[in-house]
Image: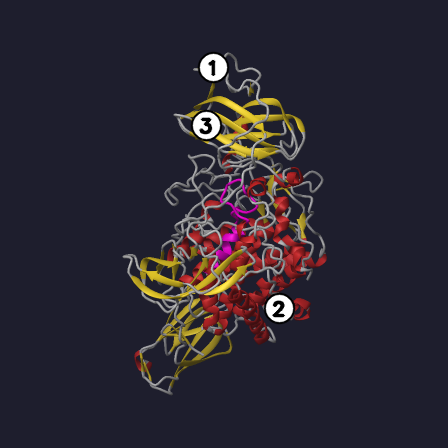
Amino acid sequence: MKPAEAKNPTRRIQKKRLAILTAMALLVAGLTPTAAHAEGPEQISNGTFDTTTAPWWNTGNLTVGITNGQLCTDVPGGTTNPWDAIIGLDNIPLVAGETYAYTFFATATPARVARALIQLPVDPFTSYLTANPELSVSGNTYNYTFTSPVDLPTGQVAFQLGGSATPWRFCLDNVSLTGGAEPEVYVPDTGPRVRVNQVAYLPKGPKNATVVTTTTTALPWQLKNSGGTVVAHGQTTPRGVDASSGQNVHSINFGSYTKAGTGYTLTADGETSRPFDISAAAYDQLKLDALKFYYTQRSGIAIDDALRPGYGRPAGHVGTAPNQGDTNVPCQPGVCDYSLNVSGGWYDAGDHGKYVVNGGISVWQVMSTFERTKNAATAETIGGLTIPESANNVPDVLDEARWEQEFLLKMQRPDGMVHHKIHDQNWTGLPLLPHLDPQLRELHPVSTAATLNLAATAAQAARLFAPYDASFAAKNLTAAKKAWTAAKANPAILASPADGNGGGAYNDDTVTDEFYWAAAELYISTGEKEYKDYLLASPLHSADVWRERGFDWAATAQLGRLDLATVPNALPGRAAVRASVLAGADKYLATLKAHPYGLPYAPADNVFDWGSNNLVLNNMAVMAAAYDISGQKKYLDGVLEGIDYILGRNALNQSYVTGYGEVASKNQHSRWYSHQLNPDLPNPPRGTLSGGPNSSIQDPVAQTKLQGCKPQFCYIDDIESWSTNELTINWNSPLSQISAFIADQGDGSLTSPGKCDVDYKILGSVPQGFAAEVSIKNTGSSTINGWSLTWSFLGGQKILAAVGADDSQSGATVTAKNISLNKQIKPGKTVKFGFVAKNAPGPNPVPDLIKLNGAACK
């Protein structure tokens, strides 16, 4: 493996067109209106429109005139982009290092959000001020400050007014731009200094909070119920200065209080926290919402408003004008001489691109959320997701994953290699609904990394879909093997870091980890020697793969390690693989315990990555797997404490999940969840994770507001802050895993194993498939009076007949119940039953998990 920084997610800087401009835009617009006072000369000629609108100009679809001393125009409806209708003024001189005050009065009838810019007047139209004023019918005066990073005698003032489906009227007056202003200082509103999980703590789980204070000695704290009654109290633990926030903090541990309720608050040092619940059911809805996120990310299908009220929209990129569509997409010039139908899949983030390497880890985590229900003692069935396929007798979570997996299959060439990505030829602006995107779509070159992503996810899909759709499972297995062979023949075709116009580059210089992940999934699904030999010979197999920064789309060996540990297979030395997961979890648990905010993520260089929240969750996923393997409560508690950071116990005192917590992210960077820019559009749906603090603050908004920020403060909930506030499919996927894990833990108590031993023996082959015998021993002190045994096959095996038990099967999961003759199992006694089952392609390992009356047996 290369050093960790070689696969740092911050390389996604190529993902945004504005990243090209970073060097020019270190200081740009303040987006929050502030009172500005300046003494320099006026830069705007004719900002009052007393007798004329000259020298202001406008696009051809606008007619401007003077009404009551204001410049006014009727803006037509039906435009797509903000820049489709513009009023502007040229030749505005800007001086590098000068701070300017910019003010204007404007109205909108009806109310609208406009875009006010001061920018370079030619391509690439570098913006030095970008503001999104919410215009009202009665009108307001808007005040902004910005510092110019360049000397520019020909700057441009522009009001972008397009992008509305319906017509409206815009009026402008008293435009002023003067130098000599005081630079704006952004101070986030962090609310009360007591920081808690604003959603809920489990009754029997850990309960921790953080207090920001100047005091260095212990302080008294009180826990109050919704009626204001003190129900618990104690002393804080001073923790010193937290490096990730620069704050002096104390910890509060109130885990001994276990009574469920709503509206609790913590008080310490004269401050009272935001409210929170103590509840065993608080994560049940987040478990679903985090997965429901994917339906509204779908490409190539109309989103039904009846299924997602407020989020309905026409199908995107199906070739209906102005779309050029994904049904017949050519390659970039010089890349290939064919076109492919690559419709469907999930839009990667807030743009319209679709990327195999990002889609790979995302669909793997979504499918793994389902696969855990087969193999983990505490896992519960995932409920319905209210999607178009909900009535087809396939688990909704698999149907949703299939939408992406079908797209990944379409990206494969006949020779087995897979195109890296497909997206617009050029970057588009915000807002822009998918069906209105007019850009040419292009396939980008194949890559070894993309090919191995398909090999891994298709192998995983082959075993998971086998009980529901054998032909789709077989199609995936064929594609996986073909991709593996192609990647072995082409082991070093790497995505170019320069291929970042119109979409992210997603370049990855090391693919040994993708080879390991693909080999692991292929071995689990086939049991074949080629993949076993590759795994055992790989240096990664025995390496410490648990990076302090966590795994992600560019560091995927951990995915293979986790599945080898948690999905039944016959790999030699598997016990060591399982032990390595516990070792990784211990590393992240130690990080969490040492961190004053209970954060299982603390890069040694104190630099938070792009999408740091997903890395936090991925580290928690390792702890969750360790709990599933070992049943040790320390790992369960680590996950339960780690989620506190995501949901409010952080320096900014906010939840990063939309709709969860009193103060939560709601303006994530998106072209269609763009309510901040267009009130007619929605915010992201409930259960959407924001990427979170990013020390590198690559976008202009963050660079303006957050210069010099401590890591936890390198975040702003602004739709234009694509480097700190992005949403992506591979950030919601670990949220799906972790929210499901927590929802499955009930009140947070340790789940006791059953008092039983089960011996599951495969006796051999029979004409119909295979025969097996199962023995159940009662290791408890009480008679078992009626029993039900459950387990899951790896793939498409199907019970045909049982002797000594009544059997039923749903998907891969079998339930065997007693018959009248063997209903009772006395202490120390054993009952047996046998069955004959139909074989399925691939191995038929003994299940890791067998439950008797709902409790896991040894």
At label 1, the amino acid type is Ile
Pointer 2 or 1: first along the chain: 1
Residue position for label 1: 66
The N terminus sits in image quarter: bottom right
Pointer 1 or 3: first along the chain: 1
Q: CA distance from mark 2 to mark 1?
A: 78 Å
Residue 331 appearing in the image: no
Q: Which residues are magenta?
A: 714-738
Question: What's the magenta bit mostly, secondary-structure-wise?
Answer: loop
Q: CA distance from mark 1 to mark 3?
A: 18 Å
At label 2, the amino acid type is Glu
> 10 Å neighbourhood of mark 2: few (<14), some, or many (≥20)?
some
Placement of 836 over or under 739, stated as above or below = below
Residue position for label 3: 141
- Residue 458: % across, % down: 57, 57
Q: Are marks 2 and 3 in contact (CB under 8 Å)?
A: no
- Residue at x 59% of width, y 45% of height: 707
- Residue at x 69% of width, y 38% of height: 333
Residue 774 appearing in the image: yes
